[in-house]
Every structure is written in C-alpha cells, then in structure tokens.
Image (cartoon, rainbow, N blue to C red):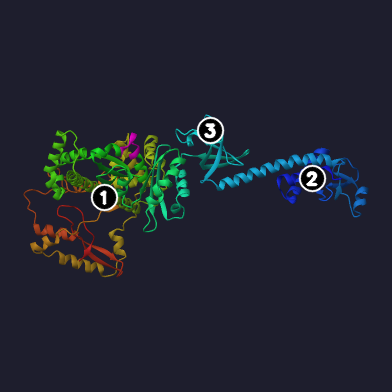
Amino acid sequence: MKSEFLLAFNEICSDRGLPKAVVLDAVEKALVSAYRRNIDANTVENVKAEIDPTSGRAKIYVDKEVVEEVVDPAWEISLTEARMIDVDAELGDLITVEDTPDDFGRIAAQTAKQVILQRIREAERDVQYEHYVEQEGEIVHGTVQSVRSNVVLVNLGGAEAILPRSQQVPGERYHIHQRLRAYVLEVRSTNRGPKIVLSRSHPKMLRRLLELEVPEIFNGTVEIKAISREAGSRSKVAVAARQPGVDPVGACVGMRGVRIKSIVNELGGEKIDVIEWNPDAATFIAKALSPARVLSVRIDEDPDGRSSASVVVPEDQLSLAIGRAGQNARLAAKLSDHRIDIQGVTEAATWALQRVNEDTDVLPSLGPAAELLPSVASILQRHEEERGMPYSSEELLKMRRVIEGVWDHYAGLRRLERERRRAEERGRLEALEQARQVIPDRAYETSIEAMDVGTRMAGRLEEVGLTTAGQVMERLIIEGDEGLLELDGVGPKTVEQVKEGISELGLLEEEPVPTEEEVAEDAIPGAVEEAEALVAEEEKPEPESAVEEEEAPEEEEVPDPAAALQRAMQGVPAEAEEEAEEPAPGELEEPEFFFDEEEPIDREEKLKRERGRRVQLVYDEETGELVPRRRRKREDGVDEWSEFADY
C-alpha cells in the first residue's frame, strides 16, 4: 500500500503537469521546514531531507556536534553514540545523524502540499508576467468580465487586465461577455501577479490594427509616417510607399473600402482619413487638410524655432478646412508637426492690399504680380457688392499670385532678421572666445564672494549665472557696463564697486616691462652708436611731402580683447573708444607745456623732436641684436602708435 506522502506527491505531479524532479526538490525543501516546525528547533543548521521515489519514505538527516555531556539533543550527541556511527569521531566534530520523527509521513505530506501549492502559484504568476511583457505594445483579444464606474476588467484567458476610463473610447459602451480587442499599454509585476493595463484610445492601437488588416504595411511595402487621433471621433494617417508603383492610400483602403471598414467597425465608427505623405511640407499640409481644397500654403519659421504654415482656402472651403470645433485643423497640425493658420481668400487678399498701401517697400518687391493689384481690388469690391458670390478659378489665381508675392516679401525680411541674429550670435561667441584668451585661468576659479561686492550684488550676479570673477570680466569685455546695468537693482555705483573688487584681486596685473637701461645692458656692443647715428640722420629736414607720407594712416587696427578689458575696467565702453580718444572741439584738455605767445615755435625743430621720440631700440629675437625701430602714427589726430616698423 502506498504511503500518504507518495499519493500526495503523485497527485500534484499529475494535476499540475510538472516534472517529478522539480516537485521532488520543492518537497525536500518543504520537509526541512516541516521538521524544524515539528521539533521546534529553528536554530538547528545543516538539515537535509531525502525521499525515496519508489516507496515515498522520507528521511531527515541532521548534523550534530560531538560533546561529553548532551544538553540539547536536537543538535548535540555524546561521544559514545557518535563512535557507533563513526569510529573516528572526536569531541567537537559534526556527525550526520538520521533523525526522522515518528509518524513524519502524514505531517510532511500536508505541510509539503501547502508549500508546493504556494510555490506553484508564484511560478504561474512569473510565467504570466514574462508572457505579457513580451505582448506589451501589441493587440490582444479578451472578454469583458466586469464593468465598473472607472474601470473595465477584461479576461485575457489565464490573466486579468484592466481598461481604465482614461484609455476608453469616449461614447463606447461595454457589457459583460463582450469580445473586444485592445492595445497592451503597460505590464507591471506585483505581489498578486502581473498588472496589465489596456487601451483602446491610444494612437498606436490604430497603427497595430492597420498592420493586421493591411498586408502591405505588415511586410513593409507601405510605411506609416504619422498618426493623429482623437479617439471615437476622427483620425488621420499619413502613409508612404517604399516601392515604386504602389498606391499607399489604395492599399490601406482596400477594394471598395473593405480593409478600412473593418477597422472603422472595430473602433466603433471612428472616421479615418488616409493621406499620402509628401516630403514637401507645403504639399503635405495641403493634403492633410483634406477633404478641404487648399489654395496656397506658405511655410515659415516662428521666432521660437517651430515651423508654422499660413494656409489660404476659398471661402466655401473655410469651414470644411477648420472642421467642427477646429478638429480638422487640429489633427492636420499634429500630423504635420506644424502650427497652421487658416484664412479665407477674401481676408488674405484684403490683408495683402493693405500691406501694399501701408508699406512702400512691398510694391517694388512684387514684380509682375504688381500689375494684378487693380484687378484684385476690383474683384474684392465686386465680391462684397454681390454678397459672397463664389470666385471663379481665374480670380482665385490672380489673388493667389498677389498674396504669395506679399508673403515672399515679408518672408525675406524675416529671413534677413534671422540671419542677422545668427550673425550677432556668432560675433558674440567669437568675442567671448577672444575674451577667454586674455582672462587668466585663476579668474574662473575665483568666486563672487571673493570680490567683496556685497551679499545683495552677489545674489544678483548668481541669478543670471555669473558665479566667478572670470564670467563677470567676460560680460564687461563683451557688453561693457551695460551688461551689468541691465540687471535689476544695479546702478553705476554698484558697477564701479564690482570693478574695484576685480582690481583688488590683482587679476589684471601684467608682467613688468623692461626699462631702457635694462635693455641697453643686454644690447650688443656698437648697437647704441649705430642707433645714435640713425637718429642724427633722421633729424635732417625732409620735404613736406615726405612728412605727409610718413603720417599717412595705415590699415585699421583689429580690436584687441585685452584693450577692451582695460577700457571696461576704466569705465570706457567699447563703442565709445573713438570718442574717448579724440575729444570734441571745445573740450580739449590743457596741454602739458605752455609757451609764451611772443616766442615763435620753429617748425623744423618741432619735427626733429618728434622724430627723435619716434625712434627706439628694440631687441630682435631672430638676429639676436638690438636694432632701432621707428613708430608711425595710425591716424591723424589720434594719440595711438602702431607697432614698430623697420627704420
């Protein structure tokens, strides 16, 4: 007669269809747990269970410690009993001993069955989760099991899913035992099993239905470019053929619309517009506004960077292009990813004529379309007198040419403005790069607090992203004082305080320039005498034309970032450089020397003095010698000297 344990073991294997090895491993772990509970010895370690598959007899083996005097028989054994099992046993050794309790088969059978059933339920939940995770993003079939106020429970055949109200199609009604298809939106693992969230309003459900119903989409001959959907009402699908000679719209619609009708029936009568995709944005938008007929489309870029489209339609197509509550225009905007502005041809033509009358620059830019202005004006007047009579095709063509001509003019202005802004941005970046070359690295390591500008000013600077002294110096070089004065609560005194804080840090200190004596000490013998001879030759009077030629201005100087930084620290803006260097008449500073009016000044003597001051000794790194060089003025009346030129 078979034991109770073996009967239970065979019952579990047959009912669940599991291999005996898997169940046997689970039962052995359950027997260990039952043994610990039976003898109330949870502290006992190294407990092992063995089961005879033929007889079903279970045995428990426990490792016990060899001691002289047994205190706890659950985990200790005497030396005499240990040597009966192992003759080599010594004190302190661990001996494996069979310790199967009496009547353990019945107890183990019930305990093992409960544990195994629990583990089988956990395994089933794991299998369900792994299965439906792979189904995420696909269409599944189910049966409505329960309908509640905020959720519908759907039985997927082995798993239960939920259809929240937010994912239901507006106006759609569900009843128990109803068969439906839904899109698997999300699958999450929980303690009670996988949580499966379904959707019938997601745009990807329409994509999956098209893939199931249209073989050309499934095999890749036709590609879905974009979908815009308002569940339960209307949807637009843009498709394109990936092989020549294939009609993408016809493939989706099917013979007599049989393919698209099955999808419409599945979605409860939702209208679906299938549109052929076009790489030209204007052409695609005109098709996306179907069934309305579009007269003209102009694509432009908004200041925020998003593309927009201005659409003109005939008056009788205006309501159709906009749609009920703007639905058609809204779906077309989502489909094309453009902001769409729709106007009637009368409104657009009236606006074009107003632009021509108010802006004198518009008329010359129209070209041949300017000849149509009187005709368009008479067409609008007649249309107003006849109270909305439709335009003829010829009249629509004339108005279209005028409207597009005005559009082209303002589109060109906006394009120039964008190019100007890009050029300004490039110039700002170049100026920033040049500024960073002259600002020392330690300025970027110096925080605002080290500048001693006060807590309030430091907070203002940090609000606009100026956290180091180097960043403040960049702002002063590029924008001057205005870069800080534009901040809220910052005035001229505060700007001067910031400059003083930068100066006190010593960030603008330059390396000392060697004096003339130091240069002379390092000069090559004979170079000084040669320079004096050249100076004497320079003092000879020259013709008037030679003086004028000598003082002729040279090429314009390239702006120096270091000089800009010095001007910024001195409070002189970059754009006011020329005014600062050349004072206006009546505001000239007093000269350093005064001469008696009665004593005449010799012109030749003055020229000699000036030429003498313009000749200096400069060390030439290539030849390793000290050579004389002469300075030249850049511009007449400007006290600024160019680099030394060879004498």
The type of residue carrying mark 2 is: Glu
Say which quarter of the image contains residue 156: top right
Tell me the distance, in whole angstroms, between the alpha carbons under discs 2 and 1: 80 Å
**Residue 639 % position (x, y):** 19, 52
The type of residue carrying mark 3 is: His
Q: Earlier in the sequence, mark 2 or mark 1?
A: 2
Query: Count of labels shown?
Result: 3
Q: Quadrant of the C terminus?
A: bottom left
Label drawn at residue 419: 1
Task: Tell us which disc is closer to us: 3 or 2.
Answer: 3
Q: Earlier in the sequence, mark 3 or mark 2?
A: 2
Magenta stretch bounds: 321-329
Mark 3 surroundings within 10 Å by alpha-carbon count, few (fewer than 14), some (14 through 19), many (20 or more): few
- Mark 2 — residue? 45
- Mark 3 — residue? 175
Q: Is residue 17 left or right of residue 613?
A: right
